[in-house]
């Protein structure tokens, strides 16, 4: 479901959609404005995971928490998450605004026990197989370079999808969908009512020097109710 604003994500119709997608329509200059900064950040992250920061927000027993307490937990988590970007005010402001908007919205949409906020640098550590996520959902914003590729179920050969090569699992490549840098997307996972969106990372891109172009991604995961921190690491 494409929407103008994330406010539409709380509708009944949105609850049945595997992908909720707000296109922000960044131009080329906007999509590349953080690329040099992201290469700097990549030097700080472990190469295998690209993880710059991960913060678990424990909302267990939330019915006993006042709204202000939930908000305080979210704000605290975002401050922790974004501290690694503090040398870059435009980027840190944008990530904080997005994280606050998404986390607040997810909290409204789901009866959350927890959410996990992550900032990751993605280069060669991309997830190149088509797959569904094993949780309720993941909101994702990519800040530079290409965005997530995804498919309508009608465009998937599910038998081919399960095969090792996945050859032919995309019935019509022309119908493949892809977010752009700046877009906000919620991908439902297998544990959601709508079912899991089939998606994958974009193919890595390279600088003229031959080194990989790193992308910065904000991910906010909604684990299944009752699952703890270690269950949602991947
Ligand atoms: Fe995934």
Image: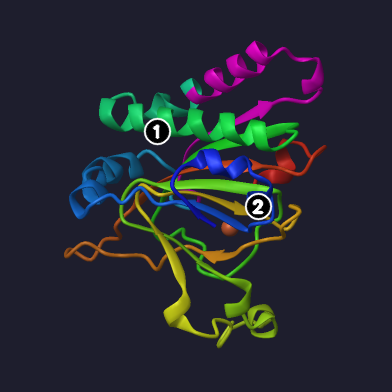
**Label 2 sits on residue:** 13
As displayed, is residue 113 above or below residue 37? above
7 or 153: nearer the viewer: 7
**Is residue 95 found left or right of 21 in the rendered image?**
left
Whole-percent x and y of residue 2? 49, 56
Q: Earlier in the sequence, mark 2 or mark 1?
A: 2
**Which residue is at the front of the view, 206 or 22?**
22
Residue occupied by mark 1: 95
Tell me the element at label 1: helix
Where does the N terminus fall, quadrant-wise? bottom right
Q: Position of residue 204 (x, y in %)?
A: 36, 65
Residue at point 41%, 28% (across, down): 97
- Residue, x 25% and y 40% (percent of image)? 37
User: For the view shown, which residue lies furthest in the bottom direction?
Assistant: 168
Crowd band around label 1 with a 10 angstrom C-alpha radius: few (<14), some (14–19), many (20+): many
Residue 88 is at least partly visible in this image:
no
Q: What is the spatial separation of the Cα atoms under label 2 and label 1, in whole angstroms?
A: 28 Å
> Assess mark 2: CB under 8 A from ligand 1?
no
Q: Which residues are magenta?
A: 49-78
Q: Is residue 37 left or right of residue 174?
A: left
């Amino acid at each position: 479901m494409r929407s103008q604003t994330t406010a539409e994500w709380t509708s009944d119709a949105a609850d049945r959609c595997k992908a909720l997608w707000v296109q922000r329509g960044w131009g080329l200059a906007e999509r590349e404005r953080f690329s040099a900064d992201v290469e700097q950040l990549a030097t700080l992250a472990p190469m295998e995971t690209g993880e710059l920061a991960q913060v678990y927000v424990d909302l267990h027993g939330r019915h006993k928490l006042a709204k202000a307490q939930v908000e305080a937990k979210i704000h605290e988590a975002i401050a922790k998450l974004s501290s690694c970007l503090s040398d870059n005010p435009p980027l840190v402001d944008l990530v904080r605004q997005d994280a606050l908007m998404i986390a607040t919205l997810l909290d409204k949409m789901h009866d959350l026990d927890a959410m996990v906020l992550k900032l990751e640098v993605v280069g060669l550590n991309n997830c190149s197989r088509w797959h569904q996520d094993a949780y309720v959902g993941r909101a994702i914003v990519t800040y530079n370079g290409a965005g997530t590729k995804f498919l309508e179920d009608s465009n998937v050969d599910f038998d081919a999808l399960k095969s090792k090569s996945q050859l032919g699992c995309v019935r019509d490549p022309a119908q493949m969908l892809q977010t752009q840098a700046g877009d906000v997307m919620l991908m439902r996972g297998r544990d959601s009512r709508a079912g899991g969106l089939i998606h994958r990372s974009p193919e890595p891109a390279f600088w003229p020097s031959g080194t990989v172009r790193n992308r910065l991604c904000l991910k906010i995961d909604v684990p299944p109710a009752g699952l703890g921190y270690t269950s949602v690491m991947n």
